[in-house]
């Protein structure tokens, strides 16, 4: 028979073990939603979101959890990955509102450009793997990046307000991270992309490797070009661009922005 101290030790272990931290703990990128936070996180945002409605006792939900957690990590800074626990009494109004009849139910919320705080809602019909979830969500992200030809860049700069962020790329597709940054700075900076195959691009911007980013600003002295020489990752880019423009309210800023290391400061061309 177990002694009282041993029983207490077991109870404390269960109480403070990772499993007790919740279905999706703070060590994951999944946002745990409640009726109080649902509107601000999902409705009042410029980002596409995927929301899982689940119950902790559900076997299929337990099977999905590692894949959903992996997808959330992959989509950091690009889209929101969230969850609502429907076997929690306080959340049942949300589950009823979205007609959840089985677990897990996944729904995608896309920003409505015409009516703010009134996103488009659709059922997720894809596979239950991290890759399938990520691919589906990425396809639903609004693209605020303008694709440019060489002879269009100058007009784009002259007609724009605020700094112009130009990505010179050797790929035809706009990187998801760049789309996410365009949402972070929507209305305060303009984002464009141009293929390196466009005639004269490399020489015009002094770029010898691709992809590369050039920030173009104008003032009373004329046009200034700043070549970014840091890592092409969300954290350092977000911090770097904040020196030229202000992120929109609710932007998905990195939790711990890294300070720009030596050699990552901009070079004015």
Image (spheres, grey):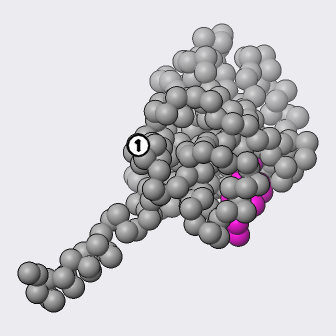
Front-lying residue, 235 or 89: 89
- Give the magenta range: 35-47
Tell me the quadrant of the picture where the N terminus can be found: bottom left
SS at badge 1? helix
The residue shown at (60%, 51%) is 53
For label 1, count other residues whose C-alpha is less than 10 Å away and answer few (under 14), some (14-19) or many (20+): few
Task: Answer left or right for 65 relative to 168.
Answer: left
Q: Position of residue 120 (x, y in %)?
A: 80, 41
Task: Answer left or right for 34 relative to 118.
Answer: left
| View extreme (right): residue | 114
Q: Position of residue 84 (x, y in %)?
A: 60, 57
Q: Is residue 231 visible?
A: no
The residue shown at (26%, 79%) is 11
Asked whether residue 4 is drawn in magenta, I would say: no
The residue shown at (18%, 82%) is 7
| Position above or below: 195 against 247 | above
Total numbered labels placed on residues in the image:
1
Residue 207 location, quadrant:
top right
Q: Which residue bears the numbered disc 1? A: 63
Q: Position of residue 136 (x, y in %)?
A: 60, 30
| View extreme (bottom): residue | 4
| Position above or below: 62 against 170 | below
Residue 90 location, quadrant:
bottom right
Front-lying residue, 116 or 242: 116
Tell me the quadrant of the picture where the C terminus can be found: top right
Q: Is residue 57 visible?
A: yes
């Amino acid at each position: 028979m177990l002694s009282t101290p041993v029983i207490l030790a077991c109870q404390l272990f269960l109480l403070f073990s990772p499993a007790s931290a919740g279905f999706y703990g703070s060590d994951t990128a999944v946002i745990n939603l409640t009726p109080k936070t649902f509107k601000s996180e999902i409705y009042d945002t410029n980002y596409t979101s995927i929301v899982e409605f689940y119950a902790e006792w559900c076997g299929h939900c337990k099977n999905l959890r590692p894949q959903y957690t992996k997808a959330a990590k992959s989509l950091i800074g690009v889209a929101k990955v969230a969850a609502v626990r429907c076997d929690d009494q306080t959340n049942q109004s949300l589950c009823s509102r979205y007609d959840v009849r089985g677990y897990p139910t996944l729904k995608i919320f896309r920003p409505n450009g015409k009516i703010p705080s009134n996103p488009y809602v659709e059922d997720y019909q894809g596979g239950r793997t991290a890759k399938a979830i990520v691919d589906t969500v990425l396809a639903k992200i609004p693209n605020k990046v303008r694709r440019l030809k060489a002879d269009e860049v100058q007009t784009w700069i002259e007609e724009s307000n605020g700094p112009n962020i130009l990505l010179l790329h050797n790929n035809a597709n706009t990187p998801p991270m760049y789309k996410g940054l365009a949402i972070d700075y929507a209305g305060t900076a303009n984002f464009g992309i141009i293929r390196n195959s466009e005639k004269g691009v490399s020489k015009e911007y002094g770029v010898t490797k691709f992809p590369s980013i050039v920030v173009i600003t104008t003032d009373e002295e004329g046009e200034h070009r700043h070549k970014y020489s840091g890592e092409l990752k969300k954290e350092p880019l977000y911090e770097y661009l904040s020196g030229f423009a202000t992120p929109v309210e609710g932007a998905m800023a990195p939790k711990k922005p890294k300070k720009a290391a030596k050699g990552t400061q901009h070079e004015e061309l």
